[in-house]
Image (cartoon, rainbow, N blue to C red):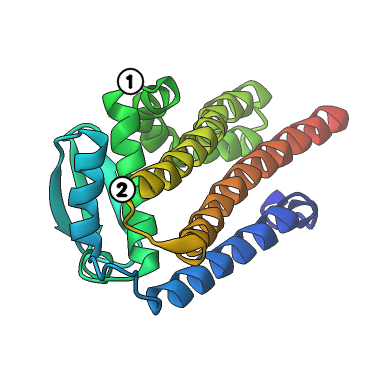
Amino acid sequence: MFYWDPMYFVFALPALLLAFYAQWRVRSAYNRYLKVPNAGRLTGAQAAERLLQTAGLYVNLEGIQGQLTDHYDPRSKVLRLSQQVAYSPSVAAVGIVAHEVGHAQQDAQAYLPLKLRSGLVPVVNATSWLAPLIFFLGMLLRMPNLAWVGVYLFGGFVLFALITLPVELDASRRALRLLEQSNILVGAAELQGARTVLNAAALTYVAALAQAISTMLYYIFLLGGFRRRR
């Protein structure tokens, strides 16, 4: 069965290894700088309020369960912080908060890639599970046209990952600029710590894009082999 095709690992393994490495980088950088207090001893929540004020934004703050679940919701204009980030006076917490404020700034300025990504969210939520189902159903039924529908639907997921990358990189650039303007982090060492955390997080989005592309290429490879066998 093609479900266990060894060629899958030829396509998927490099991206999978990159994903594991990216997750390790994020955890390592986060845990390291979570132990480093910022000079002003500001918690993540306090830093969020100051950064929002610096950016001239009016955004509600809410708590959320989990670890590294912090995010800005452009639909409800809410910045949600995990407890560990909200109450930690660390360089890592400030860096993460600044990144999410960067997203709020993107939203306020109608940053086009963010608008495109937000518009794709309902499509991706529907097709992320439907596309593989349609693809493999087409392969099982020997209906290549149906399988191609699955590939095209999965292309929406690839597009989402592609658009996400500049959105996240731009949010990190904005974060560092806001941190410099607000003087929350003092000295090159603290700013470098925040940059390290943000760069590690960015790598996870590169890995997500690589995984999406490798999966789509594998689907196309399977369809190519199917046509040759007909």
The circle on residue 182 is 2
Residue at 25%, 40% (x, y): give it: 54
Q: Residue at x 21, y 46 (%)?
A: 79
Q: Earlier in the sequence, mark 2 or mark 1?
A: 1
Could you say where residue 211 lies in the image, as x and y percent from the top left? 63, 47
Q: Residues within 10 Å of mark 2 (few under 14, many from 20)?
A: some
Q: CA distance from mark 2 to mark 1?
A: 23 Å
Residue 131: x, y in percent? 51, 34
Does residue 163 appear to the left or right of 73 in the view shown? right
Examine the image and state in which quarter residue 145 appears: top right
Q: What residue is pinned by disc 1?
A: 110
In this view, the residue in front, 165 or 10, is 165
Q: Is residue 23 above or below residue 123?
A: below
- The label shown at residue 154 is none
Check the image and name the residue furthest to the right.
228
The local crowd at label 1, few if under 14, some if 14 to 19, many if 20 or more residues have their Cα within 10 Å, is: few
